[in-house]
Image: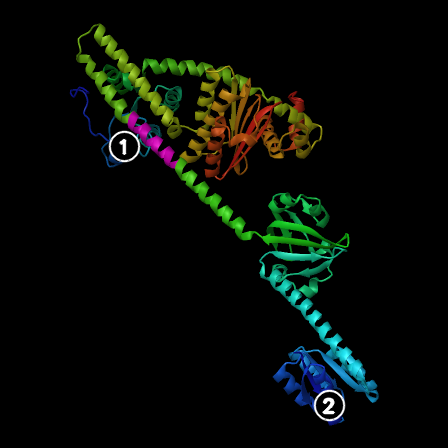
Amino acid sequence: MLPKEHYDIIGEFDRPRLAIESIESGNIPEIIIMDISLPEMTGLEASKYLKENHSDIKIVILSMHKDEEYVLECMNQDIMGYVVKDSIGDEIRLAIDKVYEGGKYFSKEVINLALNTHKKRKTRKKELDEINLTKREREVLALIADGKTNNEVAEILFISERTVEAHRANIMKKVGARNTAELIRKSITKNLI
Amino acid sequence: MKKILVAEDSIIVNQHIFKTLEGSGYEVFSAFTGEEAVNEANKHLPDLILMDIMMETKSDGIEAALEIKNTLDIPVIFLTALTDVGTLDKVKDSQPYGYIVKPFNEVELLSNIQVAIHKSKVENEVKNNRDLFQASINSITQAFFLFDQKDTIFYVNTSTESLLDKKFNDLLGMPANESLIIHARTTDENYNLDTLRSMEPDELFSKELVFKTANKEIPIGDVILKSVSGKGEVVFTLFIFKDITDRIKARELELEIDKRRITSLIEGQENERNRLAREIHDGIGQLINLVKLKTKGVAEGEAKEELNQLLEQTLEEVRNVSENLQPSGLNNFSLEKNVEKLVTQFDENSTIEFEFTSSDLPDLDLKVKTHLFRIIQEALSNILKHSQAKNSTIQLYGLENKIQLTIEDDGIGFNPESIDQATAHHGMQNIEYRVNSLNGNFTVDSNQKSGTMLLITIPL
């Protein structure tokens, strides 16, 4: 499908391991076109390996996946091209040319996707910076601050002691405390109790 | 006809007694020395022996009586002359049935004989009953205790002896509160004879307890506690139980087998889903892409437009089916990312506010990731369908040596006891199987006031 006058195809493999073996035996391409869902090792894992060990090789991902996390992961890995299989045909050619010249090419659909979710993430992230306790967790925290033991909390709230322990562990994680004293101190400064 | 042996060295006296007894309808044998008495007793097995204490001026009647007592258990009446009175002390060991002091008259002799034979018969019956009772009690594998009015041990059977590794004589008279150290099998609740008495017999019988001895703890069941009354008051308390070590082992084995069966079932299911997803994605998906490519050759126009649209839809459908079978993200991304996406989907497609927090998760293998993902998926579907909640919070943390997953909602709650019956809670069972297959722990805390919380911990 690629016009032969410009590019030589020096290998075709149905799994990343074989491609990597071929590369490491000296058959080094300038560009690799890589799927994501592959046997033994995913395309993303293979790309990561190649980035670390053969950083000169440029990678264009060719995938059916149109989900944000795939695209974001590829952007994080500094992968230069991402083409959705739907638009295969002219687009892959464009992508290869662009990447070969040192540019970037991402299919239009996934670019929008990535931009949108990137924005969404940002707003979400901001919310998460505040400590957001559930109703039950606030009740448990108040009782702990009151000096109640897990057992007493369990009895007051009609829940099992195991559940109280779990709530306590969750609250500590959210507040970032390692023990009860720190939990109470931080909870007070953060206006949780 | 009752048989009587007369051991008397005086021929005249011997003959006299012989005649008298024969005349009264007894079959009579004679012996003139102690040695002869033993021989004759062995030979004829008489119902009674009349034994002169002094024979041939030796007190060998006593020795003969002792030997007969030990080997044959035949009742003996001693014939004594007044001069023998000093030796009477010595004969106590042979437990004679009476003494007749010479000289005696006929009536005295006969009445003494009748009383002795009767007494021996009654005693034999009692002894036989007791032997039968002991043999029966000892033949059962259950431990058997008999406590007296003061709640001290009166009797235990051999099963109890071997269970406690103690002899009956050491246990006799031991108070119940020292000999019965019992607690519940699954809680620390302690029991004593009084608390056991206050329980309903059926409840007690079905209860599993632990019996503590000096060096081991024995699980017990099938407990029976019964008061035996006589003359209107409690005379004995009967306490019977069974060592259920084997029963518990068998049950645990059964559970283990069940667990393994279900685990491999679920694992097989996941593998199959994975295979199907891959085949659909790689096989059918690729083919459709190829078809799409070929539409380039089709003349432009409405038909081509429609064809491309249909192919687009088909491709979307293939992708959805494949994703539902096995989220491809599980192969490619961390559990956190996958769950975050899942929770966002639930959040955006329902009126419930779903929130997900996570931190400190270690790298997990695909099996753990898949199970936890499915668990969360199952739980969120349940919340969506049944809880009527407004908020739901999913938290997933790596703790010291375990992963802790909590899924809370502020809905109407449900009764965890009904997990088995309600089809709506089929999902809960599924969760439980998956947790089991990760050797984790699963509890549900639910009430109508504050909603439901699932707590799952998986050891690392």
Pick the residue in front: A53 or B362: B362
Q: Is residue B383 left or right of residue A24?
A: right
The circle drawn on residue B14 is 2
Q: CA distance from mark 2 to mark 1?
A: 118 Å
Pick the residue in front: A179 or B26: B26
Q: Secondary structure at mark 2?
A: helix
- Subunit of mark 2? B
The circle drawn on residue B112 is none
Coloring applied to the structure: rainbow
Q: Amino acid at mark 1?
A: Arg
Q: Position of residue B363 (x, y in %)?
A: 45, 34
Q: Position of residue B263 (x, y in %)?
A: 43, 38
Q: Amino acid at mark 2?
A: Asn
Same subunit, tags 2 and 1: no
The range drawn in magenta is: B267-280
> Residue B277 colored magenta?
yes
Q: Is residue A34 visible?
A: no
Badge 1: few (under 14), some or many (20 or more) residues near its Cα, within 10 Å? some
Q: Position of residue B180 (x, y in %)?
A: 68, 53
Taken as a whole, is the magenta stretch helix, strand or loop?
helix
> Residue A183 colored magenta?
no
Question: Residue sitting at 28 percent across and 26 percent down?
Answer: B282
Q: Secondary structure at mark 1?
A: loop
Q: Is residue B286 left or right of residue B427?
A: left
Q: Is residue A7 visible?
A: yes
In terms of image quadrants, where is residue B206?
top right
Badge 2: few (under 14), some or many (20 or more) residues near its Cα, within 10 Å? many
Q: Which residue is mark 1?
A: A15
Image height check: is B36 above or below B108? below
Quadrant in which the N terminus of chain B appears: bottom right
- Whether pointer 2 and pointer 1 mark residues with C-beta atoms closer than 8 Å, the reply is no
In terms of image quadrants, where is residue A111?
top left
